[in-house]
Image (spheres, grey):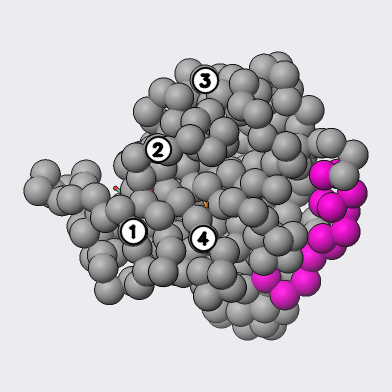
Amino acid sequence: MIILKIGGSVITRKEEDEPTIDHENLKRIAGEIAESTHQKLIVVHGAGSYGHPLAKKYAIGDEIRNKEDLERKMMGFSLTQQSVKELNGLVTEHLRREGTLSVSIQPSSFILTENKRIKRAEIALIKRYLELGFVPVIYGDVVLDENEHIQMAVLSGDQIIKFLAENLHAKRVILATDVDGIYNKNPKKYSDAHLIETVSSLEQMETGEETNTDVTGGMGGKVSELLELLELKIESEIINANTEGNIRKALNGENVTGTRIKK
Ligand code: ADP
Ligand code: IPE
C-alpha cells in the first residue's frame, strides 16, 4: 500500500488569502495518478489557501479564553471544515474524472486528537475501502481535541500520513510538494540553498523560514512527522509535484529527484 500526500502548495495557490484552486495542476496530477500502476493507494491532501488562512484567523488550536472566544472559534471551525471539504470535493472529482475510483473521507468525522496529536480514529473503515479497491482521499482538517483548554485542533495532512502509515503498515510514503525536497535552507529565499538527498535528522536543515500563513509547521512539520515514521522503520520520500511526470514515476517505483528520509 502506498500513501501519497499532495501538498496544499501544489493544488491551491497557497499565497492567496482566499481559497484559490490550481485546476491545471490538479487535473494533471489526477491524470498521473490514474496512469500509474500502483495497487492499493491512499491519497492525502493538504489544505493550502482553503484551510490555513481561516485556521489562522480564528486561532484554532489556541487556548480558549472565555465563552465568547469559544463561540468565535466554533464559528471558525465550522467555516474551515466547510472550506477544506470543498477542496476535497474538487480533488475527488478530478481523480474520478481522470479514472481513479476515489472516495472522500472527512477527518473531523472520524479522528479525535489529544494535545493536537491523533488519539483515536476509525481505521477499520479505511481498511475496508482499500480492500474493496477504492482510493480513499483524506485531507488536512480541523478536528475535536480532548484537551479541554483548546477543544479544537488543526490536523495536518502530514500528521495523517504518519498515523496511517504506522497503523496500516504502508509500504511506501510519498510527499509531493512545490520544491524538489528538503534543502539546507529555504530554496525559495536563498538561491544558494542545496538539496539534501538523504535526511535522517532535523539538524540537517534550517526550518525557521516558513511562510507565515502555514499553521501546521511547513517543511519543518513535515520532516518531524517523517522522522517519527523512520523510527518505526518506515522510509519516505519528498518530491516535487510541479515537475510533470514526477508523481506518476514515483508511484511506479521509478527514481525521481528528491529527498529520501532514511537512516
Ligand atoms: P505543502 O503545502 O506542499 O505541504 P509547505 O508549504 O508546508 O508544503 O512546505 C513547502 C515549503 O517549505 C516550500 O515551498 C519552501 O518554500 C518551504 N521551506 C522552508 N524551509 C525549507 C527547506 N529547508 N527545504 C525545503 N523547503 C523549505
Ligand atoms: C492543514 O493541512 C489543515 C488546515 C489548515 C485546516 P496541511 O498542513 O496538510 O496543509 P498544507 O499541505 O500545508 O497546505
Kindly identify which numbered label has been placed on residue 235. Answer: 4
Which mark is first along the chain, 3 or 4? 3
User: Which of marks 2 and 1 precedes in the sequence?
Assistant: 1
Q: Amino acid at mark 2?
A: Val
Q: Is residue 222 left or right of residue 146?
A: left
Residue 43 image point, x, y percent: 65, 42
State whether residue 132 is above or below residue 143: above
- Is residue 46 shown to the viewer in this render? no
Proximity of marks 1 and 2: CB atoms separated by less than 8 Å: no
Q: Distance between the Cα atoms at labels 2 and 4?
A: 15 Å
Question: Are the residues tagged 3 and 2 within 8 Å (C-beta)?
Answer: no
User: Could you give the CA–CA distance between mark 1 and mark 3, rounded to whole angstroms?
Assistant: 28 Å
Numbered label attached to residue 28: 3
* Residue at left offset 61%, top offset 79%: 115
User: Where is residue 235 drawn, in percent x and y?
Assistant: 51, 60
Q: Out of 60 and 184, give the one closest to the viewer.
A: 184
| Bounds of the magenta segment | 118-130
Residue 34 in view: yes
